[in-house]
Image (cartoon, rainbow, N blue to C red):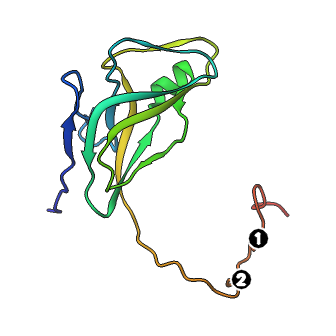
Amino acid sequence: MEHQASLCVVRLSERARLPIRQSPQAAGLDLSACLERPVDLEPGSITLIPTGIALAIPEGYEGQVRPRSGLACRHGVTVINAPGTIDSDYRGEVKVGLINLGQAAFTVEDGMRIAQLVIAPVASVRVEEVEALDGTVRGSGGFGSTGLR
């Protein structure tokens, strides 16, 4: 059996909820809003929503903050910088930048599940300056350049 890393969590508020996996094989842990009062997200607006928790992500991993599909598909509410990254050396409160891309205002309430947290390994690389890069079939073709003849 593979060793399972621990995700240490501190509640910064008594209202804060621990990240929770909604099914045994879910990739993400739900993050919940920790609010003193509801927050109205008007169409087009961006708001930073506190979760009331701080994390100690194991070294060699990152936390990826991703949208919840239900909020995105039903209401147009998503994570503005998806996926947001929480570095393993960050110890401050986890906050989620939400944007309302929908047509109607959306109210975020205390305890509402607002995003998912996926813990993923991070590859460490050494940056090396070179004179030229090796060639590929694609070359420097940019956005939309693949699959065209």
SS class, disc 1: loop
Outermost residue toward the bottom?
Answer: 131
* Residue at position x 44%, y 31% in the image: 68
Query: Which label is found at residue 135?
Result: 2
Identify the image quadrant of the C terminus: bottom right
* Residue at position x 33%, y 30% in the image: 51
Mark 1 and mark 2 lie on one chain; the one further toward the N terminus is 2
Q: Amino acid at mark 1?
A: Ser
Q: CA distance from mark 1 to mark 2?
A: 9 Å
* Residue at position x 48%, y 24% in the image: 71
Nearer to the camera, 61 or 129:
129
Q: Amino acid at mark 2?
A: Gly
Q: Are marks 1 and 2 in contact (CB under 8 Å)?
A: no
How packed is label 1: few (under 14 Cα within 10 Å), some, or many (20 or more)? few
Nearer to the camera, 2 or 125:
125
* Residue at position x 28%, y 62% in the image: 59
Query: Which label is found at residue 140?
Result: 1
Q: Quadrant of residue 129?
A: bottom right
Q: Quadrant of residue 138?
A: bottom right
Q: Is residue 135 above or below residue 104?
A: below
Nearer to the camera, 70 or 105:
105
SS class, disc 2: loop
In the rendered image, residue 77, in percent from the top left (x then y), is placed at 53, 24
How packed is label 2: few (under 14 Cα within 10 Å), some, or many (20 or more)? few
Identify the image quadrant of the N terminus: bottom left
Query: Which label is found at residue 51?
Result: none
In the rendered image, residue 93, in percent from the top left (x then y), is placed at 32, 38
In the rendered image, residue 76, in percent from the top left (x then y), is placed at 57, 23
133 relative to 64 in the view: left or right: right
Outermost residue toward the right?
Answer: 149
Q: Quadrant of residue 130?
A: bottom right
